[in-house]
Image: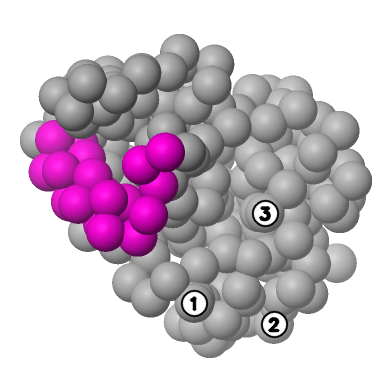
Amino acid sequence: MKFKGIIFDLDGTLVNSLEDIADAMNSVLQGLNFPTHSYDAYQYFIGSGLRNLVSKALPVTHNDETQIDQCYQLMVGVYRNNCTHKTKAYDGIFELLDELKSRNIKLSVFSNKADDLTKEITATLFPDYFNPILGLTTESLKKPNPFKTVEISEHFGLKAEEILFIGDSGIDMQTATNANMYAVGVSWGYRPEAELLSNGAKYVLNQPADLIAIL
C-alpha cells in the first residue's frame, strides 16, 4: 500500500507540551491549596482532553462535576496564555515534515486538546504544514471515536487504508484501528511502547526519521 496521507496526534507526538500543561494545572491547584503533581505524573494525565486531565489532577475529595468545571475554566485560562512558553517540537520533527511535504503527502493534526488551542499551537509552531488541524469540539467525538478521522480522510480525498495515523498513546492506536487506518506509535512520547503495541500499533518509531522506512 502506498500511503498518501498522515494524521498526527499533537501532544507527545509532534510536540513536548507536558511542562506548559503541568505548570498551568499546578498553578490552579496551588491557588486552591490542593496538592500539586510532578511532571512524571502528568504524563499519565495527558491524552483524553484537558477536562479529563483536570479531573485526574484534583484530589478525590474535590472531584465533583462543579469543581471540575470551575477548575477546567481556570486551567484553560492560565494555559491559553502560556501554551507555547515551553512547548517545542521534538528533535527531528521539522526534518521529517519537510521530507513528507517534498513527497506531496497530505498532513493533518487531530488532537484531544481543545480545538482553539490545538489550532493555535500547531499554527504557531508549524505554519504551512497541516490542513486540516482539528482539536476537541464535542466531548463525545474525542479519540478513540474515529468520526473526525473520517472527516479528515474525506478532506484529503483518500481512502482510510491510504492514511497513517501517528500517535504516542493507546488511545491514538485505538483511533487508527477504529478508522481502518495504519496505526503507528512513537516511543518518544508520554506512554510506554507496551501500551502502544497492546492497543494495535503496527509499527513503533524510535525517532521521526524511522517513518521514511514505512513510506
Q: Are there few (<14), some (14-19), or many (20+) residues within 10 Å of tag 3?
A: many
Q: Are there few (<14), some (14-19), or many (20+) residues within 10 Å of tag 2?
A: some
Q: Is residue 35 above or below residue 132?
A: above
Q: Overall secondary structure of the magenta stretch?
A: helix
Query: Regarding mark 3 in the picture, which secondary structure is present there?
Result: helix
Who comes first in sequence, dot 3 or dot 1? 1
Residue 62 falls inside the magenta stretch: yes
Specify whether 132 is left or right of 12.
left
* Label 3 close to label 1 by CB (< 8 Å): no
Specify whether 201 is left or right of 36.
right
Residue 181 falls inside the magenta stretch: no
Mark-to-mark CA distance, 2 and 3 = 21 Å
Specify whether 65 is left or right of 146.
left
Q: Which residue is identified by label 2?
A: 159
Of discs 2 and 1, which sits in the foreground?
Answer: 1
Name the residue type under label 3: Ile
Image spot of residue 134 (x, y percent): 38, 65
Who comes first in sequence, dot 2 or dot 1? 1
Name the residue type under label 1: Ser
Residue lying at the far front in this picture: please name it. Answer: 61
Q: Which residue is identified by label 3?
A: 171
The magenta segment is 61-79
Could you say which is closer to the camera, residue 177 or residue 122? 177
Name the residue type under label 2: Lys
Mark-to-mark CA distance, 2 and 1 = 24 Å
Q: Which mark is residue 140?
A: 1
